[in-house]
């Protein structure tokens, strides 16, 4: 199946009024991001590619896509040793048809694993071989198609301690009690399977300076010193409370970049409190949301080491937030449920445009970092 969008289709859509307001295709995040040498992405669900507006918006606004669930363990290895790449391949196919990069997510996580794995009562030796086989098989399948992987997801708790997981110490792969050794092992296998892929550690609530981001920083520093192949850190940026927005994000990105790794904002959304009829409780929250998106986009755009800015979905029609918060929060993304751009969209666009005018050296430096990392 091909998902290519014809130019005629675009013309039709420009003229198509939706709930009284035309969708504006004249502006494009990806065009602005391109001027910055920045990737702008969204988490995607290939089951939606057949929806014309979904496909059109994705292709016109973003130059990177990451499968929201399609490359997770449950999807790719639903039974031991049996791999299924159907959904992930659809993301790659869509991206190739629209000159977008694919970010892979994720190879190792303590949660969202299939029951055969979590309830299998494997020994550390068995788990080690299951983990190796999974990482090598998935990364090899997507070699030269997925340019960057979240190798390990959410390994630290809020205090900067390693979480107790299947992979670490329950029972673990034979490296229990040895700190980040199991993480290093995951990176080594991923690198072995695709030496050119950029390898990321990805986590939430580690955007600013805090105990968790300190632990991540210390791990990256240690990995760099010991030549464990790590290329970047993903800052998820799920902002669930308008009154608790992380500070010192720029300082955190700067210190990571100083270690020689890239930073990607990987999963940004800004959840708004909702009323019982599924509308934002306070209309003014839409501008608060816009301000937060704009600020984070500026921080990323102004730091050469921040090479990608991605949101977790792009339309409020499909977002994990309402389900995750049991309907209490929602409307967290850049486009509303009818694919109309929200104030948040305009704020990101403006942040990119301003950053592009501000400091050409930043862009040059970012392009150098990207070029270097692809060699
Ligand atoms: C979420 C997806 O959005 C949901 O559809 C799924 O049910 C659970 O996972 N951090 C991550 C993402 O790294 O993989 C999570 O995605 C959101 C939190």
Image: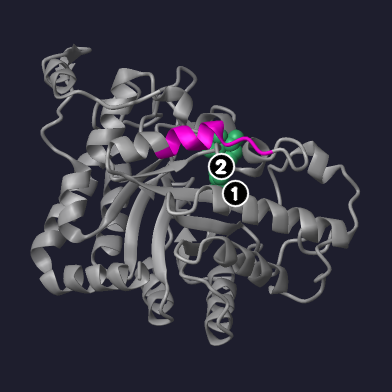
Magenta-colored segment: predominant secondary structure = helix
Q: Quadrant of residue 159?
A: bottom right
Q: Is residue 162 above or below residue 342?
A: below
**Picture layout, residue 98 above or below residue 1:** below
Q: Using the numbered discs, state the Cα–Cα distance from disc 1 to disc 2 in whole angstroms.
A: 8 Å
Which stretch is magenta? 83-92
Residue 194 position in % (x across, y down):
52, 61
Residue 146 vs residue 302: left or right?
A: right
Q: Which residue is mark 2?
A: 71
Taking the image as shown, residue 318 lies to the left or right of residue 21, namely: right
Check whether the beta carbons of the residues at disc 1 and disc 2 lie within 8 A of each other: yes
Q: Quadrant of the N terminus?
A: top left
Local crowd size for mark 2, using a 10 Å CA cut-off: few (<14), some (14–19), many (≥20): many
Secondary structure beneath label 1: helix
Asked whether the viewer can see residue 334, the reply is: no
Q: What residue sits right under mark 1 in the picture?
A: 138
Q: First in sequence: mark 1 or mark 2?
A: 2
Q: Is residue 228 magenta?
A: no
Splitting the image into 4 quarters, where does residue 18 fall?
Answer: top left
Mark identifier at residue 149: none
Where is residue 241? Give x, y as percent. Answer: 47, 46
- Around disc 1, counting alpha carbons within 10 Å, would you say few (fewer than 14), some (14 to 19), or many (20 or more)? many
Question: Closer to the observer: label 1 or label 2?
Answer: 1
Name the residue located 73 percent from the left edge and 75 percent from the top edge.
Answer: 179
Q: Which quarter of the figure is the C terminus placed in?
A: bottom left
Can you tell me which quadrant of the image ligand 1 is in?
top right
Q: Is residue 191 visible?
A: yes
86 part of magenta stretch = yes
């Amino acid at each position: 199946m091909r998902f290519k969008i014809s130019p005629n289709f675009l013309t039709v859509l420009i003229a198509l009024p939706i709930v009284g307001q035309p969708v504006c295709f004249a502006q494009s995040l990806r065009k602005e991001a391109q001027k910055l040498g920045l990737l702008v992405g969204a988490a995607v669900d290939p089951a939606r590619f057949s929806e014309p507006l979904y496909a059109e918006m994705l292709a016109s606004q973003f130059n990177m896509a990451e499968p929201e669930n399609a490359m997770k363990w449950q999807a790719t290895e639903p039974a031991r040793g049996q791999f299924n790449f159907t959904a992930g391949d659809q993301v790659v196919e869509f991206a190739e048809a629209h000159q977008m990069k694919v970010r892979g997510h994720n190879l190792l996580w303590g949660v969202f694993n299939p029951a055969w794995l979590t309830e299998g009562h494997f020994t550390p030796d068995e788990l080690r071989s299951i983990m190796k086989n999974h990482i090598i098989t998935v990364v090899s399948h997507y070699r030269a198609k997925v340019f960057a992987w979240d190798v390990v997801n959410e390994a630290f708790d809020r205090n900067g301690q390693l979480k107790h997981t299947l992979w670490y110490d329950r029972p673990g792969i034979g490296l229990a009690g040895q700190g980040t050794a199991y993480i290093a092992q995951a990176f080594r296998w991923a690198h072995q399977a695709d030496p050119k892929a950029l390898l990321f550690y990805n986590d939430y609530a580690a955007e600013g300076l805090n105990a968790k981001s300190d632990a991540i920083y210390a791990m990256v520093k240690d990995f760099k010193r010991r030549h464990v192949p790590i290329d970047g850190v993903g800052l998820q940026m799920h902002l669930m409370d308008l009154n608790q927005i992380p500070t010192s994000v720029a300082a955190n990105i700067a210190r990571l970049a100083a270690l020689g790794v890239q930073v990607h904002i990987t999963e940004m959304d800004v959840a708004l409190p909702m009323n019982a009829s599924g509308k934002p409780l306070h209309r003014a929250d839409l501008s608060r949301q816009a301000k937060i998106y704009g600020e984070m986009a500026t921080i990323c755009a102004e730091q050469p080491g921040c090479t990608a800015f991605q949101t977790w979905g792009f339309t409020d029609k499909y977002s994990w937030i309402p389900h995750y918060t049991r309907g209490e929060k929602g409307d967290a993304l850049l486009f509303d449920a009818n694919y109309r751009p929200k104030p948040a969209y305009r704020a990101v666009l403006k942040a990119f445009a301003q950053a592009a005018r501000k400091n050409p050296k930043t862009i040059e430096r970012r392009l150098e970092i990207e070029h270097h990392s692809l060699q």
